[in-house]
Each structure stands twice: as structure tokens, then as C-alpha cells.
Image (cartoon, rainbow, N blue to C red):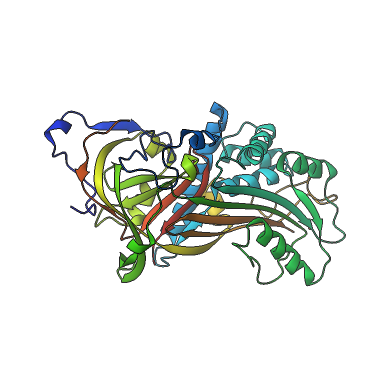
Amino acid sequence: MAFTNNRLKLKNKNMKGSKLKVQLLGLLAILTACGNSNEPNKNTGDNSEQQATVRHFKVTEQEKKIIDASVALGLNIMKAKITAGQSDNSNFCISPVGMYMGLSMLANGGDEEICAEICNALDTPGRDALNSFAARCLDETGDLSPNSTFSMANAVFTAPGIMTNTELSDILSRYFKSVAITLSGNETDLVTMNGWISKNTEGLIPAYFTSLPKGDVFLFNTLCLKTPWNKSFDVDNTRRADFHNTDGTISKVESMSKMITETISFGDIFSFIDLPMGLGAFNCRIILPEENVTLYDVISQLDKNTLSSRDFAIKGIKGELRIPKFSVSAKLVLNRETAEAVGLSKTFSPSAHFPGIICGAETMDLRMSQGSKIAFDEKGIKASSVTEISMVGGDYSDFEKSDFIVNRPFIFVITEKSSGLPLFIGAILTL
């Protein structure tokens, strides 16, 4: 049977009384049994020495709270943007880690009230904790897997004649490895900014700005991830298939396909599958609504508290996995309405005080945006983001025959596997 009805029922008598449940710790908890398969690993074989080269990003209990808060921030922004504009049907993607980096840099230039608001939104006790976790992310996530690349970079661009606070510059350099670049004040600044972004996203975002942005100081963060599936899709199996868009139309899209023996987790109105990547250093979770359930219904249900308090049933299946092959670009502007929805109303108020950024200026108007580009193909995932802040003056032996067919709007979550560090969260509404 096709896994288009995700409410699977136990049919095997041996499975009676053995429904397994796991407690999710936030949206991005990684199921220890996920990725188990009777099929050989096409990318890695069974080479234990190669597996040993994968490093894990180990975090403290306090850092787990930061990760959970970053997940919640990403989900709440997605909820505010998508559910508020349901007629738009635009695809969505956000990098919660990119948002964390940008807001953490910003907190170092704000007054105590602004810093407290940002720390509260990120469930962090203070500036020192913000900075130390940012430093750890930059120092310890760059070489997690030998067959993947993941990188982050930060920069501060200043307009000519603008002097930034020396203490802030030292902090951003020490903890965020931020480079300082002074602009020239002419049209070449557009080339300079786009060139830095393109270089640090390995060309995935070649021209973020189409015109020169206005501002005195610009904080930038970039992320770039290139990682293969642990078990790649055969290009010969890719074929055109129906995808049921949010607006009711049906598109013919290139869909990747392979046979799997995997575990599926499901709740009342959605199911999800975890797909390991980069020899297990990364994870991609595909969240699929039940048939006749909208993606908006699922998004409205997903939050840190809901997911951490819910038990999800697990079922082993053996059948076809089909996922659309796609490339999507998305741009998010964090306006005041969205900022208020995620607890950052004071930070994005026109009267917000940032005495630690520009010498001689305390009140500044902020603009925060993030652009993301992500591509799924038979080999794996390529994903990148740029965040800009501008400022002005288990063991499963029984598997049921079933398929997991992603032929309707879905959510994806890409994480560092061991910590759950949220790299990208997205929703595909239309293809």
C-alpha cells in the first residue's frame, strides 16, 4: 500500500503489544533507530574506520536550551509568515542558526533592555553565553564529516566616515570571527557585498542584493552546507510524477525514488521520516501531512512544547521512498509584526537603543532579512543562507509493506544530527 494514508495500522500479529514510542525533545530530536536498513549503504559500505571519522557536536544542557529556542524561533517565524499569507502559497526556508548568529552579534551592541529581550528569545542567560555558543558553533562544526562541507562566516560592513565601537569590534572578531570591511560610498559597494556573500556561500547565492542597501552598519552571517545522502538515489529511477500544490493544482515534477527499509514516525495529522546524511553527521527530516490535512494545520500544531510533550508511534516499513527533486530560493524580511510575534518587539522598535555599535549614536532603526537557497537531488543537498542586519544613524525486525510518497506540500528540517543544531527549516507548498 502507498504511504499516502499515514495512519498505519498494526497488521502483523507479532507486532501486537509492541507499538514503540519515543519522546521527542523538541522538533529536531534525532531518533536513534532512524536510518536503520537491511540494504547496504551505497555511499559508505560497512567501513567502521570511515564511520569513525564522523565527529559529533556535543552540547551542554544550557546549549540544548539555546538549540530548542532556535528551533522555536524558526518555527514561529514560519508560522507567522505562512499562516498570515496563506493565499501567497510561496515556499519558505529559514536558517535558525543564521538567525541566532545575527541576533547574537546584535545583542552585543544593544543596551541592557535590548540584550535581555534577545537573550530571552534565545533562552540564554546573557551575552557571555550567546558569545561562547556562537564561538563553539564556528570552531567545532566545520569538519563534522569527511564527505560533507559546512561553513559559517560573519562580517561587519560600515559606511565611510562611520566609526564602530572598538569594544564591539573586538567581541565580534574574538567570538564570531567577524571580518571588518569599510565601504567606499559608491556603486562598487554593491559588488563588494555581493562578492563576499557569493564567496562564503560557494557561489550558491551569487547576487543577494539587486541594488545597494541603505544603512550605516551591516552585520552579515552566511551558512553553506553540501552533504550527500547516506544512501543515494539512482538517477535512472527519477521520473516525472504528480505533486499536489497547496492551491489545489497538480504539477508534474521530477521525483527521486528508491526502495527503503526504514522506520516512520507519525502523530494524529502528520508523519515523518528521518534521512541520515554525510555519513550520519547530518539529518534531513521530511514531515508529511495526512491526506486531506493542510500544511497550515500541521504548521499551526508544531511548536517546541507540543512536540516535546507528544509521544510518536513508530512503524517499520519496506517500500518506495519518493521525494521531489527541486531547487528553491526564498527571502524573508523580519518586519516589526513578525518580530513582535517572536518576542523581539523592543529590538526592532525605531527607538531601540544600541549605544555599543556606532560611536556617538544610540537610537537606530533596524532591518533584518535572510535569503536561503536549497536544492535536493539524487546525490544529496546543497543549502546556503545569508542573514543581513542593516542599521541606520531501537531494533525493528517487523516491517510492513508500505511506501512514503511525498506528493503534496511538506516540511523539511536539516540538522546536525548529534546535537539537533537547526541548520535549515523549510516548507514546500508549490512545485
Residue at 33% from the left image edge and 71% from the top image edge: 251
Q: Is residue 97 above or below residue 93?
A: above
Task: Using the rendered view, name the quadrant where residue 397 is placed.
Answer: top left
Residue at 66% from the left image edge and 67% from the top image edge: 209
The total of numbered circles placed on residues is 0
Q: What quarter of the picture does the C terminus occupy?
A: bottom left
Task: Please tell me which residue lies in front, 86 or 187.
Answer: 187
216 sits to left or right of 4: right
Task: Please tell me which residue lies in front, 79 or 62.
Answer: 62
Q: Position of residue 387 (x, y in %)?
A: 62, 55
Q: Position of residue 58 (x, y in %)?
A: 55, 31
179 sits to left or right of 326: right
Q: Is residue 4 above or below residue 32?
A: below
- Residue 346 visible to the viewer: no
205 sits to left or right of 166: left
Q: Residue furthest right?
A: 161
Residue at 83% from the left image edge and 50% from the top image edge: 164
Task: Please tell me which residue lies in front, 391 or 400.
Answer: 400
Q: Position of residue 153 (x, y in %)?
A: 68, 49
- Residue 126 visible to the viewer: yes
Q: Position of residue 49 (x, y in %)?
A: 50, 34
Task: Using the rendered view, name the quadrant where residue 87 is placed.
Answer: bottom left
